[in-house]
Image (tube, rainbow, N blue to C red):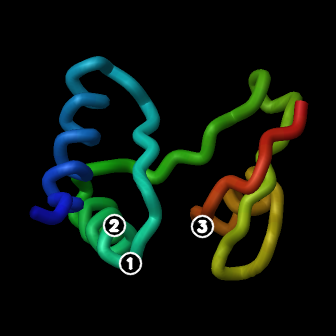
Amino acid sequence: MGKDTIADIITSIQNADMNRKGTVRIGSTNITENIVKILLREGFIENRIPRILGGIGIVILSTSQGIMTDREARLKRIGGEILCYIW
């Protein structure tokens, strides 16, 4: 029997919400990305870019508009995949 990816995603999100966690890490596949996009679009989850050390550090992101810092992404109001944290 195969793994139920969709149930795993939903369970991870529910568990994080119940435990008041701000972040959920799930494997990246086409299915998971599309489900997360729908949940974002419908307002069930938020796409937040973390602030490092109260804004002293930076996050480097890969976005649809290229690689940039968290500050640049916030100004452009876009999200992306976190590549690394610098502090």
| Local SS, label 2 | helix
SS type, badge 1: helix
Q: Position of residue 78 (x, y in %)?
A: 60, 67
- Mark 3 sits on what residue? 78
**Label 3 element class:** loop
Query: Could you classify mark 1 by the number of other residues whose Cα lies within 10 Å: few (under 14), some (14-19), or many (20 or more)?
Result: few
Query: Dividing the picture into quarters, in which one does residue 11 lie?
Result: top left
Residue type at numbered disc 3: Ile
Residue sitting farthest toward the left: 1
User: Which residue is label 1 attached to?
Assistant: 30
Q: Residue at x 88, y 38 (%)?
A: 86
Residue drawn at x 39%, y 25% as measured from the top left = 21
Q: x, y percentage for residue 62?
A: 72, 68
Whether residues under marks 1 and 2 lie with C-beta atoms below 8 angstroms apart, the answer is: yes
Amino acid on which disc 2 is placed: Thr
The answer to whether 54 appears left or right of 50 in the picture is right
Q: Which residue is outermost to the front?
A: 1
Q: At which x and y percent is residue 36? A: 33, 63
Count of residue discs = 3
Name the amino acid type tagged 1: Asn
Q: Nearer the viewer, residue 20 or 7?
A: 7
- Horizontal and vertical percent for residue 84? 78, 47
Q: Mark 2 or 3, which is nearer the eye? A: 2
From the viewer's perspective, is residue 12 above or below residue 37? Answer: above
Tag in front: 1 or 3: 1
Q: Which mark is residue 32?
A: 2
Does residue 71 appear in the picture of this structure?
Answer: no
Give the mark, 2 or 3, whose residue is nearer the N terminus. Answer: 2
The residue lying toward the viewer, choosing from 68 and 71, is 68
Q: Is residue 9 above or below residue 65?
A: above
Q: Are marks 1 and 3 in contact (CB under 8 Å)?
A: no
